[in-house]
Image: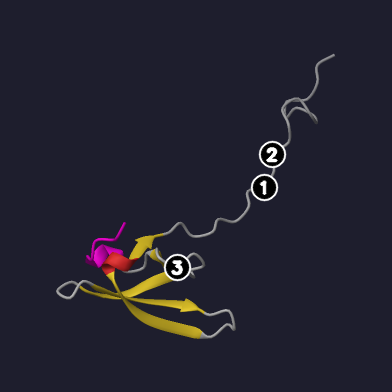
Amino acid sequence: MSVRVTERLIGDVVKVTELPNSPLMVVKAINEEAKLVTAVWFSDSHNHEEGVFPASAIDRAEPPQAPKAKKAPAGSGKSARGSRR
């Protein structure tokens, strides 16, 4: 599925749908008339890369999320109100 080339796409995270190991890229600029998207990413060697792709070749991607802190199971630990005796 391709993306729609609008100003709202700038700053979104995308990937090339045809590449199984496509890097996550950030949209830097668009060309609405030509339906082209300019994206930037870091290569495996940590170099800044930039490329121009047809909108039909890319799709939005979810950026990796930081792991959430584990929540203590209910009933463990002391209550915030204290114990009544």
Q: Which mark is residue 71?
A: 2
Hey, what amino acid is under mark 3? Answer: Leu
Q: Main secondary structure of the magenta part?
A: loop
Q: Residue at x 80, y 16 (%)?
A: 84
Give the mark nearest the N terminus, 3 or 1. 3
Tell whether position 22 is magenta.
no
How far from the left and from the top, in percent, is residue 16? Answer: 40, 67
- What span is in magenta? 1-9
- Report how far apart the C-alphas of labels 3 and 1 lie in the structure: 33 Å
Q: Residue at x 18, y 71 (%)?
A: 32
Q: Are marks 1 and 2 in contact (CB under 8 Å)?
A: yes
How far from the left and from the top, in percent, is residue 46? Answer: 57, 82
Hey, what amino acid is under mark 2? Answer: Lys
* Foreground: disc 2 or disc 3: 3
Which residue is labeled 3 in the image?
Answer: 19
* Foreground: disc 3 or disc 1: 3
Q: Which mark is residue 69?
A: 1
Q: How many marks?
A: 3
SS at circle 1 = loop
Q: Pick whichever, 8 or 44, lies toward us.
A: 44
